[in-house]
Image (tube, rainbow, N blue to C red):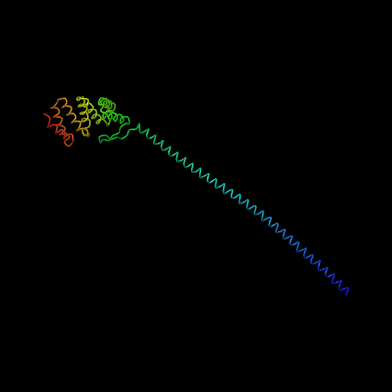
Amino acid sequence: MACLVAFNAHAGLFEDDEARKAILEMRQRLDVSQQRMTEDLRKANEDNAQLRRSLLELSGQIDALRNEMAQMRGQSEQVTRQLSEVQRLQKDMSQGLDNRLSKFEPSKVTVDGREFVAEPAEKQEFEAALAVLRKGEFALAQTAFSSFLKRYPQSGYKAPALFWLGNAQYALRNYRDAITNFRALVATDTEHVRAPEAVLAVANCQVELKDIKGARKTLEDLLKAYPQSEAASVAKDRLSKLK
């Protein structure tokens, strides 16, 4: 009986040792598992931290790229504005140069239905003389047109210059010189639109000079040369009144 109790006691000790060993092994495995989990968690945290850093770096790079693109757009817009301004300046300079050159280049003009080429100074002087005449300053107009014809004897303005010179002289009662210039107009350009008026003006000058016979002859010549003109209608009326 005593032997059985001792055996049982020994068996109980054996079982306790086995249990302790099992518990220790379980604890060891648990510690290892916890260490692994701790290590895995540490690595995961490190990986997450690295990922966050990478994301922050990427976000910074994206922001920098956006800023750079915005800056490039701003520079592009500035370049576009500068290019537009340069093109405008070039256009203005080109236009200004053309305008300055046009002051020295001959140009086409039309006077009394006739088109011809005139120098800028030539055109300016004729128009200035005509402006003086229209102001009623006949003596100055006579001088201006006489000077013009001497300076530009072959000008396309010759016929109208002779016509207006004759009118200025008629207004000054310088009838003989007026006749000379009216007749010079007709001799220069028989088909000129002012020619019938010039012939009628010659007749008017002759009437003022009391040359009635000469005036009648001039009016008759007018009717023959320019029968369809308005001046011819006036000539018919004048002839009926001249005695």
65 relative position to 205: left or right: right
Residue toward you, 199 or 52:
52
The front one of 90 and 189 is: 90
- On the rendered structure, is 15 left or right of 62? right
Q: Quadrant of residue 162?
A: top left
The quarter of the image holding the N terminus is bottom right
View extreme (right): residue: 2
The answer to whether residue 59 is left or right of residue 92 is right
In percent of width and height, residue 117 lies at 30, 33
Q: Is residue 52 left or right of residue 141?
A: right
Q: Position of residue 11 (x, y in %)?
A: 83, 70
Answer with the quarter of the image where residue 180 lies.
Answer: top left
Outermost residue toward the left in this view: 243
The image quadrant of residue 95 is top left
Q: Nearer the viewer, residue 7 or 147?
A: 7
Front in this rendered view, residue 224 or 50: 50
Q: How many marks?
A: 0
Vertical comparison of 8 with 27: above or below: below
From this view, report whether residue 141 is shown above or below residue 45.
above
Q: Where residue 197 sits: x, y (%)?
A: 20, 32
**Residue that extends furthest to the bottom in the rendered view of this protein:** 1
| x and y percentages locating residue 118 in the rendered image | 30, 32
The quadrant of the image that shows the C terminus is top left
